[in-house]
Each structure stands twice: as C-alpha cells, then as structure tokens.
Image: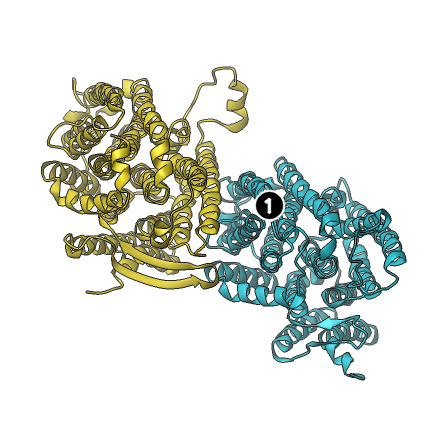
Chain colours: A cyan, B yellow
Amino acid sequence: MTSDWLQLLTLDLAVAGIAGLVLLGDAVLPGHGRVWGRLTAVLLAAVLGASFVLDVSGSTPHGAYVSDAWVLFFQRVFLCAALLAVLGALDWLEARAPLRQAEYYALLLFSVVGMMILPGARDWTLLVVSFELMGVPLYVLSAWAKNDGPADRPKLAAEAGLKLFVTGTASSALTFFGLALILGFTESTLISAVPTGALPPLAGVGLLLVVAGFGFKVGAVPFHMWVADTYQGAPTPFVAFLSVAPKAGGLAALSVVLLSGWARQSAVWEPAVLLLSVSSMLVGNFFALPQTDARRLLGFSGIAQIGYVLVALCTHTEFGVAMALFFIATYVFTNLGAFLVVHAAAEQSGGHTLVRLAGLSRRSPFLGAALLVFLLSLAGIPFVAGFWAKLFVFLAGYRAGLVWPVVLGVGLAVVGLFYYLGVARSTFMSEGESSAPLHAGVALRAAIALCLAAVVGIGLWPAPLLQGATRAARALGTVPGASATR
Amino acid sequence: MSTHLLSLVVAAPAVAAALLLLLPRQARLATRWVSLCGALTSLAGALVVAWSWDKAKGGFQFLEDYPLVPSLGIHIKLAADGWSVALLLLTGLIIVTGVLASWKVDRRDKEFFILLLVLVSGVFGVFVSQDLFVFFLLYEIAVLPMYLLIGIWGSSHEVPPAGPFRFVWKRFAVGSREYAAMKLTLMLLVGSAAILVAMFVLWSHSGARTFDLQALQAVAFSRSTQMLVFPLVWLGFGTLAGVFPFHTWSPDGHASAPTAVSMLHAGVLMKLGAFGVMRVGMVLAPDAAVAWAPVVGGVAVVNILYGALCAASQTDLKYVIAYSSVSHMGVVMLGAATLNAAGWNGAVYQMFAHGIMTGLFFALVGLVYERAHTRTIARMGGFAHAMPAVAVCFTLASLSSLGLPGTAGFVAEFLVFLGAATTRFPWWTVPGVLGAFVTAVYVLRAAKTIFWGPLPTGEFAHLEDARGTEWGAPLVLGAALVLFGLWPRLLLDFIDVTSAAFLQRLPLLADALR
C-alpha cells in the first residue's frame, strides 16, 4: 500500500507516454509527420492488448482512485475509440496538414488520458480535473481545420471550436459551482461522502448543477445546442471521435457520481435525469428528421441515442448500468463507423450533404454496405449490435418500472428509422452526380472494416460483451436507490 | 433421422446468399443457379419434414436447441408443429417459383438475390422458432430487406393528387417505389415496436425469465396482463397480416414491388403476421383472445368486405390483386377469431391456399406486365390468344380466389365459414360470404377483360406465352392449387393435429364462444 498505487495508472500513463513521445519526437525530428500516426496506432493497439493481460486492479490508500473491472471496461472502450479515430484520421491528416500531424495525435491522446482516469475517480477533485483534461484538447481539435470549411463559410471550424469552447467552459463553471455547494455541505472531497438523511435544498441544487455540467458533455437536451454546429464544422475524422468517446466519458462520470455515490439521493436526481432522457429522445429524433447534412443528422441522432441510454441510468440497478455499458460500447463502434464512412464519401464527393452521398453504394459497394449496417445498428435493427443495445436498455427500463419512457423510446425508434432509412435511400436508391468509383485510403478502410466487424460480431454474438458489461457494472457496486424497490 | 433438418431448411437460403457474396458480379447464370439451389434445398428439406412428421405423435418434432443469450433465457430453439409443416411447404414452393420468376432481373441482380434469400431464411425461421425472442428476431429479418427490395427494384406509378391532403402527394411522392417502401417499412416497424413491448410484458410477468414459447404457454398469465398483451400482439403482427385499418401499406407495397417480392410478400409474409397473432397472441393469452374475439372477428369481416370492394374499384391490375390479399387475409383472421377447430384449420389452410394463389397471381401479373408494359386493366384485352397458358392459370387462380369447389381456396373458405357459423356470432358469415361474392365479380371481370375477347392488335400484337423458367411459377403453383383443392387431407391432417392440441389446452375456449 505504499507506492504501488502508481501501477493502478499503468494504462493511463502508457497513453500519456505515447502522447509525450509523439509530441517530443516531432519536436526533435520534424518533418516525419506520417510516422507519428502509425506509431500511435501501433502503440495504442499494444496498450489495448496489454489491458487484457495486465492485472491492475486495486485502489489508492485514500480511496481517490480505484481500478477494477468497471474502469477497465471503459478504458478498453476509450482505447478502441482512440485507435479507430487515429486510423481514420491518418490519410486525411497526411493530405491536409502534413506538418501538424503529431500535434493532432498528441492532443487526441491527452484527451484520452483524461477519459481513462475518469471512470476510476472517486474523489471530486480528481473527477473534475480528469474531466477537464478530457475536454480541453477537444476544443482545440474542433477548430483544427480552421480554414477548411466550404467556400461560402470558410470559418466554419472556428465557429465549431468556439461553440464547443463556450458551452464547455460554461458547463465546467456549472459543475464547479454545484461542487462548491455540495462540498460545503459534505465537508469531504470523496464522492462517496453522501449525507444519509434528507438533502438540504442547496446541496440538491448543487447536485443538479453537476448533472447539468455533465449533461453538456454527453449532449443531452437541453444542453445540446453545440452538438450539430460543432459536428458540422469540425473535421469529420475528429467528429467521429468526438461523437462517441466524450459521451462515454460523460456517461462514466454520471454513473460514478449518481449510481455509486449519490444513489441514495435518487429522489433528487432521478426526475432530472429522466427529464434529460425523455427530452433528448424527443428533440434528437424529431430534429434529425429535416436535416440535410449527414453530420448534423448523425449529431441529432446521437442526442436521441443518449436519451435511450439515460433511461438505463435512471433505473439505478446493476442490470440497468450493465445495459447502459453495453449500449455505449456498441454505440462507439456504430457511430464512429458511420462518421468515418461519411468522411470517406465526402472526401471525394466534395460535401457532407445527403445529396452528395447519393449513389454511394454504386460508387463503392463496401462503403455503401458498411453505412447501411451502421445506420441499421443505430436504428436498432436485429442482427446488428444496436438492436441488442436498444433492447437491453429498454428491457432494463421496463423492469425498473419506467414503462412510459420505454414506450416512448420504442415509438421514437420508429421515427429514427425514418431518417436513417432516408440516408439509406439516398445512398442506395438515388443516382448521384458522379458514378466514378470511390477510393478510400487503406487505414480508413481498415478502421471502417474494424467497426463493421465489431457491429456485426456483437449483433450475432452479444453474449461476451454482455458478460463484460455485467461484470463491470457489478464492480461499480451500484447502491440500490430509494425508489428501486418499486 | 437427422436432427439438423430444420436448421438446414432455415439456413440453406442464407448460406446461398453468403455464397453469392463471393461470386463475381459478372457470373450472372451462376448467381441464379446458386439461388435456385438454396431455395430447392429448403423446399426439399420442407418436403422431408412433411414426410417424416409423425401425425400420430403430434406436438413439436425435430427439436433443436442452441443457447444465444443464456443469461436472459434466449435460445435458438427450432421445432416443427403441424402448422409449421404447412407453412414451410408454402414458403418453399413460393421461394423456388419466386427465384424462377426473377430469372430476368437484370439490374444489380446479385444484390437482389442476396436480399431475397436472406429474407426467406427469416421467414422459414419464424415458422419453426419455438423461442419468442428468436421468433421476433427472424420476423424482423423477414420484414426489413423488403425496404431495399422494393426501393431499388420496384416500380413507380402515377397517382393523381386528390382529396383534402393532395399537397401530401407531392411532398412524399405518393405512388413512387420509395414511398411504398418507406410506408411499408415504417408501418411494419410500428407493429414490431408493439410486439417488442408485448414481449417485455410477457417476459417479465412470466417469472420464468425465459422466452421459450412452450414454457410461456404453461404460464397462466393474469387476466390484466393478457388484456394488455393481446391487443399489442394483434395490432403488431396484425399490421403485417393486413388487419384493417393497418392494411394500407399492403396495396402500395405489393403494387410497387418486383414480381418475386410481391409473390413472397403477399404469399408468405402476410401469413407471418396471422401466424404470429395465432401462435403468440391467442395461444399465450387465451383469456384475452376470448374477450377480444368479437373485435378480432368483426374487424376481420370488415377486412373481407372492404378489401373486396376496394379491389373491385381498382383500375390497376396489381392493385386489384393487392387488395384481394387484404380481403383474403380477412378470411384468415376470421378463422382465427372463431377459436374453434374448424375455424383454425380453415385459417391455416387459407394461409396456405392464399399464399399459393396470390403467388400465382403476382407471377402471372409480372409476366403480363413484362410483355404488355401496362398494368391498366382497361387497356388490355384478348391476351388469351397470344398467351393461352397464362390465361388458363390466371383463370384457375381466379376460381380459387372466389372459392370454387375443387380448388384450395374453397376448402379454406368453407372451413372458416363453417367455423364462424358455429360461434356466438354466426352473422360473421354473412358479410364474409358477401365478400366472396364481390371477389367473384372483380377477379372474373379482370380475367375477362384481360384475357378474353377479340385478338389484340397494335402494340399488343407481339405478345407471347411463358417461356423457359417462366413456366416454373404457373405450373408448380397451379398444380398445387388443384392438388390441395382436391385432396385437402394432405395438409389438413397436419394442421388439425396442432389446432386440436392448442385448443385442447384451453378447454373452456371452445365453449366460450358457443
């Protein structure tokens, strides 16, 4: 119990090490841009492999950080997302910004380090610091392609970055203010220091402010305003990452705070989270309907997906958390894959609008089929991963007595199908302006193929991931909430 | 006896589809032969199942069981009862003839056959699945490829805007194949959502943490649970069965779909819906089925009459056949609502008979359309001179459609009406028989206008009879109509064993509606 707590951070430190290596290496040996991307990918894959070999479970003496199956599940998800994002960005970075490649990877990795510490944080300070570490590099990366917008709006990326930055810092401010109220009451920075009796109103307000702060990151309504604009302006390979990993991070933070720490005060937060969930499902699905830009459409669909997953969180049962984990893991592969396909198509057809995607299946059968699978998975169609995810989440909600949110969600899933099929219609049934074959780079195609394999694989054989999610949820040690006995 | 017989039947088309993926796009003939082999394997498997299914033993035979998600009690459990035998045969016949009828699909044919085969794997699976969850999974597989099949290979037609919502016509491109595909998919998916909720309810109220249909059958669900589940299942599966007023996807979808897809959809998929209502709704929620029977039967009667009247007022040949399916599926649902042996036997027999008949219809309509390039009945006439075989088969299907003795349609309708006459609501037979009369009016009128009359001239002078693979559907399906019309015991023996077993479990049921 002396210094071996450092080994709990092995994986996190390894990723931080890669980031440092890339950053320093580029400074020492400038001009070898493409090397750093490949190196990052290989090393990330090695860390991911190591996560299956090493046993790093335990907790720090003062209980600020733990490492267990729960943390490991999220870390693997983040590593997968980072690896796929790096693969997906390789060719694009090489072509667009050959001199700044190392910066991109380093920033991405720093954000991943923040994410990887997040699920294990059991102390408010550590939680907030890692949350910021996750968030700050994202502001920079959103504005990465600062002059790369369409001809009529070349500064779209600046808008994207600014919007994420302003809402991000505002949400941090909310979190800090909420924390001030909570800590003043609990007199301890440990998340688990929860009062047993009734919560005084001010501490309740504090908790809701913290929830709101995390709500920004996951993009839940009404904290969703940045989503569509940022997705539209930021570089698409980065959006692929932005649309999944920080959401998983936010979900981890919410789960840690609400389910392992403050579960006993569920009377305070449950209605609020349920409201977030229902409004996200409604707004996400209906606002996605009229979208003509694939990235905005996927942005709103992502909001709807977060609404579904929050239903599982509201159950505050171990089963519910497990289902939420399953959901978010499948969502990572599905949405990342979808954005990468959109990126690959847009790189050569000159835009992200649905019209530009027309005829994709003729131009590249692989990309067309992959996009269809991802869309069906998002829509929750059997034999792809998203079906099980949606089913499990709704099942958890139903078992916990949240019948109306579940019925609403099932109904809205049909609305979702309408716009997902709308994209499929334009890729499969319309004739595009060009019918020239479409070629994507090897790395990009590999990333898409990996996502595809994961989505189809989980769809056909969900049991292993389900087991992993269940084990992780058990490790979190969900405390049954006051109303869980309904 | 091989215990993997049912897996073979279910998987053969899917395996063929996987093989097609590996074939190069240029190998057009190989594509067709691989598809045909997959379909034939399934049909052969279905025949073996029918041959070796022990009628004396009854129950569920050829049991197979593989765990899928054991922690939630989901198993891939396949077994065949008497109903499955009849419906497997139907599906086998339709897919084999459907592949033959699609021999000339020239645009993106590889994808077409892949989707068609995947879809039919799902259909086979539903009919033999003994796990509610897998039942639902495969049901979705059977429904979804339809979107692409209609959207890509379908045909559009003009619908002149009319009525207070005429602005909607333009906005949603009513009449286009994309519209039909989207309408069909969304309506059926709303139905699926209802089924999914019903599944949750059954699963969580059974206390057994299982989706096994036989285990669920043994659970006595409380009356309130049943009253909640049954309407969900009825509307969910009923949407696919074309239950009024949720039938509106069917005419548009069937009219826009390519030939083989119409055959499969009207011939087999609508039966999935009726099968689901009976197998899941009525068997698992018997009390609610009794309570809801007047509604189910009443709506079925509306289906019969309304569908027939709609069919009678159509000018587009494919719409006539499509609406006739709505009408005939009403007969199936009426049979189901009787909750007695005659009615249930009739319902399942009607599923088979109507499947064969409507498959034959759509195959012939496809043939006619391919040659005449029009579906407007008024523009055709005298085609029998040029295509005598097509004319004969069309007339045969018409006669079965109106229930002429000696055709399979007669046996089915007779049994259903017999069943309906012995319930508490004998008046059900009146509009039912009236519907059969209207059917006679519209099918005979269509047959007369299209095929009989003076020799066609002008643009129709070059018409010719069926050739090569086109003979497949008319011959096989026409022969089946007559065979099962003259010798109904061939199938009824299977069906009766299972109907009796289901009804026997519910001794009060039979009396409740007397």
For disc 1, the marked residue is: A402
Amino acid bearing label 1: Leu
Q: Rate crowding at label 1 as few (under 14), some (14 to 19) or many (20 or more) other CA atoms within 10 Å.
A: some
For the N terminus of chain B, give its image quadrant: bottom left
Image location (x, y in percent) of residue B296: 35, 30
Q: What chain does badge 1 belong to?
A: A
Residue drawn at 51 percent across, 61 percent down:
A458
Mark 1: secondary structure: loop
Q: Is residue B165 above or below residue B234?
A: above
Q: Identify which residue, B18 or A404, lies in the foreground.
A: A404
Image location (x, y in percent) of residue B129: 33, 53
Residue B93 in sight in this render: no
Residue drawn at 14 percent across, 53 percent down:
B56
Image location (x, y in percent) of residue B3: 25, 64
Instruction: Please give left or right for residue A442 compared with residue B490 in the image.
Output: right
For the C terminus of chain B, give its image quadrant: top left
